[in-house]
Structures are given as C-alpha cells and as structure tokens.
Amino acid sequence: TFDQALQGRAAGVQVTQLSGKPGAETSIRIRGTSSINAGNEPLYVVDGMLISSDGADISTGVTRGPRIGALASINPNDIESIEILKDASATAIYGSRGANGVVLITTKRGRAGKGSVNFDSYYGLQEISHKVNVLDAEQFANLVNDAKLNANATPIYVNPKNLGKGTDWQNELLRTAPMASYQLSFSGGDEKTKYAISGGYFTQDGIILNSDFKRYSFRTNLDREVTKKLTIGNSLSFSKVSSSGVLTNSGTIVPGVTTSALLFNPILPVYDSTVNGGYTYENDRGKVLGNPIAEAREYNSFSTIARLIGNFYAKYKISEGLEFKTSFGIDQITSKESAFGPNFLKRTEASKGEASIGDVNALTWLNENTLTLNKKIRGDDRLNVLAGYTIQKFNNESMFMYAFDFPDNRTGYHNIAAGLNPQKPSNGESQWTLVSYLARVNYTFNNKYLFTLTGRIDGSSKFADGKKYGYFPSGAFAWRVSDEKFMQDVKSISDLKFRVSYGVIGNQNIAPYQSLALIGPYSEGVFNGTEVYTGREPLSYVNKDLKWESTRQFDVGVDASFFNSRLTLTADYYQKKTYDLLLSSPIPFTSGFSSTLLNIGNIVNKGFDFDIRSINTKGALDWTTSLNISVNRNKVTNLANNNTDILFAGSLLRVGQPVGTFYGYIFDGIFQSDKEASSSPVLKGQEATSSNPASRAKAGDRKYRDINNDGVIDEKDRTIIGSAQPDYTWGLNNTISYKNIDFSFFFQGSQGNKMANLNSYDLLNFNGQANVLKEGGLNRWTPENPGNKYPRALSAGSLDQGVFSSAIVEDASYVRLKNVTLAYNLPDKLVKRTTLNNIRIYASATNLWTSTKYSGYDPEANTFGQNSFVVGFDLGGYPMAKTYVLGINIGF
C-alpha cells in the first residue's frame, strides 16, 4: 500500500509497518506523538476529499477476521504525487482535521494532447524475512528431562537422540507466497475536456497459511471547461477489498498461530488420524496451545470492504483574479466480516464451535465552499485571500451476531441459526458533525518576503455544550535571502530561503458522545424461565467541560541549494506543545465510575528534520542521492490527579518521560549459588516460609535489582527500563541511470528504540511446558555452564513467570535494505517497431536485508496497532516478508 511506501522517504515522518499481514495497517507519526486518546494518525486528502486513516470506520473489529488497513483500498498505481504538510501554518487550513499533519494525495489526471494507454503488471514471491530459532525435538527433550530432574521428578524421554529434528512448526505454518498486480489506464483530452480512467486488480497470498488479500479498483478523473468562466470536474474511485486471515496476536486463552508455532512441542506430529479433525489435538506438555496448522487451516475468517470515494467540484471565475469554488465529496464504506471455528479446535473447545457475522455501513460527506482573490498589487507584490465555509458529517451503523455449539461444522457461518447456543445480537449507530469557517491571507512583497496569516473556527458535535467551537490561528513568514543584493556575488549558493511559523491546531479525533450521560441495560435476571432486563443504568460520567485538545507548533527552517542546485538542503527545528490533552483518567469511585475522558495533561515534542539531496554525476551516467534524518524528543509535562503515574501492561505515562516508556524490574543476572540466592532479596512471594520452604530462589534463577534496598523485590522496585521512542530515524536512497538502465537502492532505519518482546515470557521460560528460544535453551544455566543471562530449567515453573523486566525489553534498532530495483527501458528504435511508446522491464526486491539485535520476528512489530499509549510491544504478530518482483510497464 502507498502508506508503506512512505517509510523512510520523508524527514519528520515515522512510518511503522505494524504487521506483515497482507493489507495490514501502518502507523504514521508526523513529528512525534502529540496525543494519547485523541489519535495521532495524519489526515489523508485524496483529490480534495478527506478520508479516515485510523480504520475505526471500516472494520467491525468484532469477529476474528483480519483487520484491514484503512488505506489498503486505495490503489497506489493511481497516485501521481504525495505531499506531506508538517508545520502548523501549512496544516492550519485543514483545521482540527490536520492536527497530526496532512498527507495530500493527487491522483493521475488527463492532459491535453494525444491519448495514451498504459498497462502495468508485476508478479512476485514472498518469504519470511527472519525466522525465530527454537529447539528441535532432541534438544527440547533434553530440556524437559533437565527441568524434571531439577524439580526432583522423573525424566520423561528415555532416549532423546532417537527423536531427531522432529516437527518444525514454523516451516509447516509459513510458505512461499505469490503476489501479482495488473492495471490498465487511459488518459488524454483536448483543451476543454481531460480524462484519466484506470482499472486494477491486485492479489497477494500471505506467508501464513490461509491468509490472503485481493483488491479490485476502478478510478475515473474528469475535468471539463464548460465556459471560459466555469470549470467542473470529478474524482471518483471504487474499490472492493477482500481478505481471509488467521488469528496471529495472542488471545487471552489460546494464543494465535504464530505464538503456537513457536511454542508447540516439536516432538509431536502435525496430524493424528485417530482424533476428530485429523490433527494433533494440542500441545502435550502443559502449556495451553492449539495446533497452529489446524487453527490456520480450519478457523476461517473473512473480511470484505467496498469503498466509494468521490469528489465533485465546480470553479467559477467571477472576475479577473476572483474565483469561487464549491465541492461535494463522499466516502461510502460497506464492510462485512465473517468467521467460523469448528468444534474440534482447541480454540473452540469451550464453545463447541462458534460462528460470527458483523457488518458496518459508514458514510462521510463533505461540502467545501471557498472564495479566492488573487491580485497583483504593484511590481512583484501579490495578494492572495481565501475565505471559506465547510461542513462534514459522518454516520456509522453496525450489526453483530454470533452463536456457539455447532454439532455439524459443514455449513460454517453460512447458517448461524444451526448453533445450539445463540447469543443476543447487537447493533449500534453513531454520528458526528464538523462545521468550519476559514480565512487565509498570503502577501508577497518584492518577491522576497512572504507573509501568511490563517484563521479557522471549527465546531464539533463531539464536545460539550458551550465548548463545541474552537479558534485556531497561525502565521508564517519566509525570506528569500538569495534574491538580496548582498547575495549576488555568492556564486556557490543557488537559492537560500529562511522560514518561520507558529500556529495552533485543535484535535477532535475521539469517539462521539464522550461528554454525555449514556444509559444502557442494567442487571439481567430470569423470571418464569425467561431472561429479562430489570432496568437501565448510566454508562458514562457526564463531563460538561469536555473541550478541544490543542497543539501549538513553532517551526523555523531553511531551504538552500548550492553549486547550481547540485546540492540541496532542507532543515527544520520545531516545537509542538499539546495542551488540554484528551486523556482517559481515573476519577473517584464515589462518582460511580472508575475513569472518564478529561482535558488534563500536556505533551511536548521537539526535534530536527534534515533532508539532503545531491546530483553526484550528470550526463551519460546520472547518479542522485537523497538522505533524510529525523530527531524527535517527546515528553509528558502534565497529567491528571496531581501528575499521578498511569501504568498499563508495562507501559508508563509519567511527567518528564516520553510516551511509550517501559516500566518494570531490572534484571540483574543469575544466582550462581544457593548461598547467593539465600542471602539476596528475591521477588515477593518467593521468600522461604515454614509452610513452603521450597519457594526460595536457588542457583540458576533470575535475580532482580533491589532499588530501594529494603530486602525484598516488590512493586516499589520497578523503574524505567527503556522507551519505544527512537533516538532518530533515517532513510538513504540512491538512483543511478546509465543509458537505458536504471538502478536504485534504498536503506531505512531506526536507532535507539526498545521493544518489549512479550513472546519471551514463554520463549525464555525453561519449565518444559513449551518450546523455547534456541539460544536461551542451549545456553541455560547449569552447574557445568554457569551463565549469567539465561536461568535454569525447572519443571515446577519459573519463579518469575510473567514478570515485566529488562530481561524481555530488547534493543529494537535496525538498518534495513528496504528496496532494490533494476530496470531496463527498451531503446526507442526497437520500441517504435512495435508501434508502442515505451516498454520498461524491471526487477525489484523489498525487505531484502535487515540488521538488528532484536530476537523476535521483526523490530517494527506492534501488537496494539495504532494505539498511542501502549507502543513497542510484540506478542505473536504476523511476521514480515521479503518480496521478489518482476514487472513490466507498456505504453501505447
């Protein structure tokens, strides 16, 4: 998808590919994390139509179906250009919707002249980019026996050597998967009418069994000059996306297929014809795991999304320099999810089979009306004034039904009434409206001094009465220094411009009705054998003060080019301060609720963006290089309840620390003797007592740092153990052309960020109940191998299982060869003999090489998706893939 293609390409834009799943979401942060609960994804504007980017509007999220990224429905082959707006002055015209930056997408349009026809196609193969090494059958058997002996129990496996390699569950689950794309486009026109029409088909199988993605797309862009004063046009696209998928991120009871493939007993075979379903039923060593191959093949999950994005405009030239424009756009989404799990799977053991169906219908419409005055005042002075009014409305309707206990699996979710244990269906509807008044003045003085003032009033239905409207001004100044007389003799500088801007932008990206008293059913009961409701109860705390979250951004920058524009530099320093942070905060229980959304909290982001481009050689050999570097420092400066810490799942919000801070115990090595263990502080609950003297830690167990020196390791000894925020991110691209050959290679990386590898709770727990990381399992502590990193094997279970500590927080810095492309353009003489305009053949590879210390599948993984609070966690995600592609472009 095109948002994945942005990764590493622009300074100040951090793109994280959250999953290797086909069509998966990405997370994009422009100049850092500015909010917690109000969203951080940028606004996407496609040919003037604003579209949702967080996926909440197009996925029910109620079945186990694959969650499809909101932007996966857009065909990247239709895109002409992408522009990213970062500072407050540039984004101010979009008001609250541009609080997290704006990505402007312009699709291909027709041009006057001879019509053209283009056919683009490629075919590729994918394979896993990195495999996690775990123990084979023989090694696992030795670990289990060792764990039993250390617990004074009888070993299980008599002769581990006879077991050999056993089953490689990752090899059984993962595959080499194909992908292909086909697109046909037509464009052209005359002086009055221009057109661009395209149709495309894209298909991609996932590297995990039974996961795939398909997209059918159609686009038509038309522009018509009706009269010399009136021009009309449209941008219209329709796409249908379908996906089948498997559950990868770990569930609460039975983990997803990737976790199961890592942990499942390698001694067991995949199939067992003696049981219902024909698969080995479950892991036999104690850890609750479903057979990953059975879960992937038999638990069927499907998602389908039909999306219509259209924008119609009319421009009328009232007089010379004065123009009125009106547009009306829609974003119509119909989403359907279906899932079925047969009764013989471990995942559905309790429910005896389950089926679910969910539907979402969402419509956004947007009307914009602007009046623009563009006048030349005197000499080179120009005045541009814009005033406008916009209104946007969103409506969402959803439905969900499910049932349990299916004696017969054959009809699946197609006959949900066959379930013997039907559940109550549910449905919902939500709406919100945004009304805006805007004005912008641009004045250019002497073609060297540029002034911009913007003001916007936004009114959102999401906030409390009396708090719905916010005013968001901004201003900018630019000075083209290179046009000054004193610069005329400086021949090495081709162009030099200084910029400064300051502005305030609001954020209203929260669910509607947060300020209202919501009411729902209260306490189900049974009367005469019939289940009834006995009343209604309030569901939310009334917040009559809920208002806009606002971000104030200061930016100062320089644009420079040197040596006849052979070298260009863009550098910016920025500071973003978010006030009245919309944050879900704890409140006194006397209110009847534990938490509510409050305007309380501040966040600061400040940093540098650098973009350097050079033309290294020109002529027969053209070689260009571009390098971008982004440095951002994030800090929470205020929180609710007298700056009380907020902690969830090992992630900490604390004043003075960045969002994404990890909080836990400090792993301090391994006890090398029983004497050391008995004389050292241990985790609370491990102390030896008269009733349970065996609970005391021994040689080979993990030890943790006693921060407050009170002789016991408890919650008071937790501390900051890292951050998911990188020190800097970067991208480096080189493009080399020689005659008809083009070659490019692109490196991208992130440095200094940490990752909480929650898979290590099990992969580094040597109790013999599940498979473990090979490096840890083979180098575990033994009297003969008294290491200081990995604990001993103990079948009674690790004494610190589930402890969030620095033992599982890893360095997730990486350098990746993101893309390599080699292309050949057939010579014109040869092409003309075929009556074609051009033929280009290319080969490309993506994610070809990655250097990282991270032990998981990929250092970009994020179990919690686009969540802004709980970032940098990896638990059973979908592995990233390498891709190898051959393609052809033909122009008629």
Image (cartoon, rainbow, N blue to C red):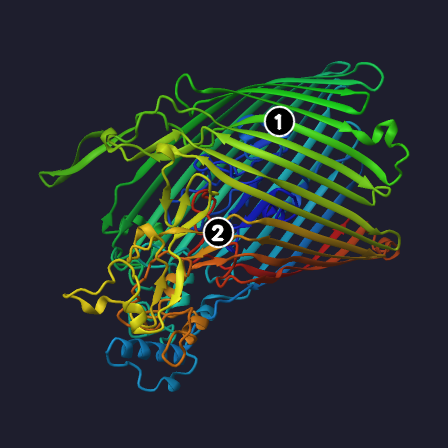
- Res 449 quadrant in image: top right
Label 2 and label 1: CA atoms lie apart by 44 Å
Q: What secondary structure is marked by label 2? A: strand
Where residue 870 appears, x then y in whole percent?
A: 43, 46
Residue drawn at x 43%, y 80% as measured from the top left: 165
Where residue 483 appears, x then y in whole percent?
A: 84, 29
Where residue 882 appears, x then y in whole percent?
A: 59, 61
Question: Can residue 84 be seen from the camera position used here?
Answer: no
Graded by Cα atoms within 10 Å as few (under 14), some (14 to 19) or many (20 or more), the crowding at tag 2 reads many
- Is 148 situated above or below 237? below
Which amino acid type is marked by label 2? Ser
Q: What secondary structure is marked by label 1? A: strand
Badge nearest the viewer, 2 or 1: 1
Question: Can residue 424 be seen from the camera position used here?
Answer: yes
Q: Is residue 194 shown left or right of residue 515?
A: right
Q: Identify the disc placed on residue 243.
A: 2
Counting residues from the start of the chain, the first of labels 2 and 1 encountered is: 2
The residue nearer to you, when weighing 255 against 192, is 255
- Is 595 situated above or below 686? above
